[in-house]
Image (cartoon, grey):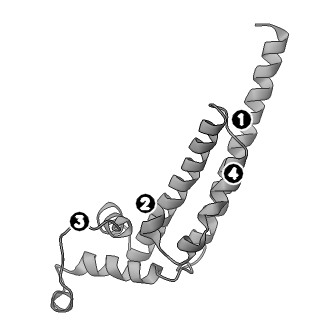
Amino acid sequence: MGRMAEAAFVVDSARRRVYWLLMLGVLFLLLWPIWTVQYPAMVDYPSHLAQVEILRNWTYETVLQQRYALVLKPFPNLALDLLGVYVFSWLDVPSAGKAVLTVLMILFWAGCHCLGCAVGRGRPVWLAAVAALLVYNSTFLYGYVNYNVG
């Protein structure tokens, strides 16, 4: 390998390192508002948490069985409910909700990186870090978590 190729490899390696530091910093910025508050300020989010609480305790509480009917049909918007009840059942309900929001953030962040690599023909594109910040859009702030996961 010649000196020019070696220099290009070193520069490319340094750029990738800076890119990943930037992307990890953006991921930290995305997750920080979720985990630093008790309940994220999202309009529909408390109803999702209440739904998870009802689904977790429905078989044990007769009052919930009297007030709510458990409909076991596939619905398209059940991401928070299924993840909160089954996948993160070992966490309390608010922490399970935050874990689902964390999964949502990581999926969006990784999607921005993959889209950037596809646009950049295998090389990371710096705009992926900016695009990842768009996860905080109006549908997310309204609390439509299932819509955002989809």
- Number of the label disc, if any, that sits on residue 150: 2
Q: Label 4's element?
A: helix
Residue 134 is left or right of residue 78, and the answer is: right
Residue 27 location, quadrant:
bottom right
Residue 150 is left or right of residue 70, and the answer is: right
Few, some or many C-alpha atoms within 10 Å of disc 1 (few <14, some 14-19, many ≥20)?
A: some
> Mark 4: which amino acid?
Ala
The residue under label 3 is 74
Q: Label 2's element?
A: loop
> Mark 2: which amino acid?
Gly
Cα–Cα span, label 1 and label 2: 30 Å
**Which of the marked residues, 4 or 2, is nearer the chain's N terminus?**
4
**Which of the marked residues, 3 or 2, is nearer the chain's N terminus?**
3
Few, some or many C-alpha atoms within 10 Å of disc 2 (few <14, some 14-19, many ≥20)?
A: few
Q: Which is nearer the eye, 73 or 129? A: 73
Residue 79 location, quadrant:
bottom left
User: Which residue is located at x 68 percent, y 42 percent?
Assistant: 20
Cα–Cα span, label 4 and label 2: 21 Å
Name the outermost residue toward the front. Answer: 119
Query: CB atoms at circles 3 and 4 under 8 Å apart?
Result: no
Q: Position of residue 24 (x, y in %)?
A: 65, 50
Tell me the quadrant of the picture where the C terminus can be found.
Answer: bottom left
User: Which residue is located at x 50 percent, y 76 percent?
Assistant: 143
- Number of the label disc, if any, that sits on residue 16: 1
Compared with residue 117, is residue 91 higher up or lower down, i.e. above or below?
Answer: below
Q: Position of residue 87 (x, y in %)?
A: 33, 60
The residue under label 4 is 129
**Which of the marked residues, 4 or 1, is nearer the chain's N terminus?**
1
**Which of the marked residues, 3 or 1, is nearer the chain's N terminus?**
1
Cα–Cα span, label 4 and label 1: 13 Å
